[in-house]
Amino acid sequence: MRKPLALFFPLYTTTLLMLLGSGLLTTYISLRLSAVHVSGAMIGAIIAANYIGLVIGGKVGHILIARVGHIRAYVSCSGIITAAVLGHGLTDIIPVWVVLRLIIGLCMMVQYMVLESWLNDQAEANQRGVVFGFYMVASYLGMALGQVVLMLNSDLGVSTLIVIALCFALCLVPIALTTRTNVGHMSPAPMELKFFIGAIPKVLAITLLIGMVVGSFYGLAPIYTSQQSLSTQQTGLFMALAIFAGLLAQFPLSWLSDRYNRNMLMRINAILLAVAALPLALLTHISFPLLLGIGFIVSLMQFTLYPLVVALANDMIAPERRVSLSACLLMAFGVGACIGPLAVGALIEPLGGNILYAFFALCGGGIMALSRTSKKEEETQMAVDAPVPHIAMPDSLSSSPLSPALNPAFDEQMIQETMPAPENVVEPQVEENEAAEEPEEESKYPPQGADPEVDTGLQRAFTLLEDSVSEETTDKTIHQ
């Protein structure tokens, strides 16, 4: 276990500093705008802009990394983020903040792509789980430390922005000094959105609702605490405990999801989320210790929903479509993370901050309703050999630690491990007379895999291989 930590320590240090700055910036912006009485709708728009930037950054990052490489892409994006963070202190024009937040989200997605594709490429197969385990610990630790900084430095002025900019500037140092630079080329993930809308519409809808919950929490929970008359230090403690709950929830979740029906676990978590959120939705004023306790339970429930829905989606989809599934889940989550802050932010001003947890309870009820399936549906939808990705969800669309599930770029090694080998596929043997007597039933889903009429790269490679074998055979024959 010491070897992966020693090999990837620069990347872990970079991740910790980057998430420290990101977590601190998210809470700072919400508190700063609330202090100057900016409308909830505009705060929601700023938070939504961050998630829009994350989604766009998936495509931009693939192009940028392919052209200039991992280190240059990371360094350039970190420089842009540092400038954008300091830009918040140069102007109070809110539309400019929306643009700055979009730019930061876009560049942070590129940084996530660099780090995770780098770790996945350099990690050995038998150590990948340990490597990404340390990565997620660094991610959560960085976000929690960001809230601790807010507790120690309650000033909402330029000094906090300078601390955030320092974090993004210092995260350049470890990755720039690392000697492990031979990272493989990344390939874009295919998209089959139409197929998944027809095959697993409920799962995509649940993913959308989860994105609405997570996006609203990170952006608007500080607004709720400020309306509860909490100080900046108390808000930092509340957010730090919530993030710690997200990390703590992953361990029992991993054990339970391997032993019990994931659909049932999804319904139980949704019910518990709705019930736990009701006190914070109904009580106008609540004591700080009780607020911390109930908020901790709500966070436990909301941060276990996304890993479950990803595992459930993989249960329902055949192995050859799981790379495409990851990109579609990213899209659904990203859309939800944009809609949630916009909708809740528009309602906070007329209805108060309690509407945030009322919205959580409503989403919990929706998830519970969508996760109800008949026994026949579960038997027909379950795929064989489904992976169990237990994914922790920070305030970003960073990908799964075990597979780049939320990132629209995948390295070749991961795609080759996800796709079944052609020689392992067993074709059913059907006699000609039986095939003639019994016509095949048409499937309600489109055929899986690539279109045989399309000239794909794999077909071209196979054709070149056949040509080379034919030439060698001809040469041997002529020589003889």
Image (tube, rainbow, N blue to C red):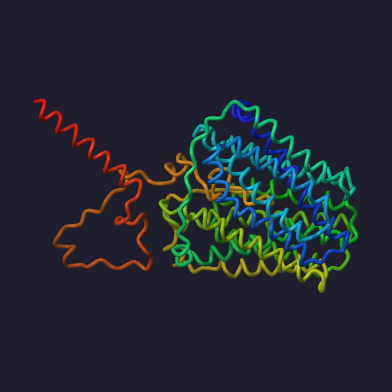
Reply above or below: 331 against 456: below
Figure label count? 0
Of 235 and 264, nearer the camera is 235
x, y percent for residue 4: 59, 29
Of 456 and 147, nearer the camera is 456
Question: Going by the image, does 349 lie left or right of 105?
Answer: right
Of 126 and 95, nearer the camera is 95
Of 253 and 206, nearer the camera is 206
Residue in view at x 25 percent, y 54 percent? 428
Residue in view at x 86 percent, y 47 percent? 158
Q: Residue furthest bottom?
A: 350
x, y percent for residue 251: 64, 45
x, y percent for residue 311: 53, 53
Residue in view at x 57 percent, y 28 percent? 180
Please tell me in which quadrant of the rendered image residue 98 appears. Answer: bottom right
Question: Going by the image, does 434 lie left or right of 380?
Answer: left
Question: Going by the image, does 359 lie left or right of 163?
Answer: left
Quadrant of the drawing holding the N terminus: top right
Reply above or below: 239 against 271: above
x, y percent for residue 247: 69, 46
Please tell me in which quadrant of the rendered image residue 339 appears. Answer: bottom right
Quadrant of the drawing holding the C terminus: top left
Residue in view at x 53 percent, y 45 percent? 403
Q: Residue furthest left?
A: 480
Question: Going by the image, does 426 lie left or right of 340?
Answer: left
